[in-house]
Amino acid sequence: MKITLLGEPKSTNNIYKYHCKFGFPSGYLSAEGKKLKEDYQWQAKSQCKEKISNKPFEIEIKLFFKRDGKHDIDNYGKLLLDSLTGIVWEDDNQIFKQTVSKWQDKNNPRIEITII
């Protein structure tokens, strides 16, 4: 199964906000992050017609950016995987192998997720 999420991939650094409460750092999803998560969920629901899997699986994620540049691929997974929980899989702890790569596509930035 393959799911394509349209739009420029967003780094975790851009969608989570942090503050210090009672001397302890705390992170939360920003308004922009909540909107992006909802968008990912709607896009996934429109493409995923199969029954939610409860078995272990492997995923391949391809990040397509408008511009070539410094994109740390380890900063793009958390929101993405959480967004697809309950739609594509029961829980992202079912993923036993994850491959992430980055590409450039000036005209069509997107995220392609292939479930193997």
Image (spheres, rainbow, N blue to C red):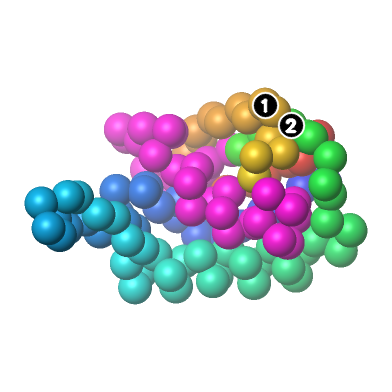
Camera-side residue: 36 or 86?
86
In space, the residues marked 1 and 2 are separated at their CA atoms by 5 Å
**Residue flagged by tag 1: what amino acid is it?**
Lys
Q: Can residue 106 be seen in the rendering of this structure?
A: no
Q: Mark 1 packing: few (<14 Cα in 10 Å), some, or many (20+)? A: few
Element on which disc 2 rests: strand
Q: Which part of the image, by quadrant, shows the C terminus? A: top right
Which residue is at a point 69% across and 28% down the rendered structure image?
96
**Residue flagged by tag 2: what amino acid is it?**
Glu
Q: Which residue position is annotated with label 2?
A: 58
Element on which disc 1 rests: strand
In the image: residue 97, left or right of residue 76: right
Label 1 vs 2, first from the N-terminus: 2
Q: Can residue 23 be seen in the rendering of this structure?
A: yes
Q: In this picture, which residue range is highlighted in magenta?
A: 62-91
Tags 1 and 2 touching, CB below 8 Å: yes
Camera-side residue: 28 or 81?
28
Which residue is at a point 77% across and 47% down the rendered structure image?
2
In the image: residue 18, left or right of residue 80: left
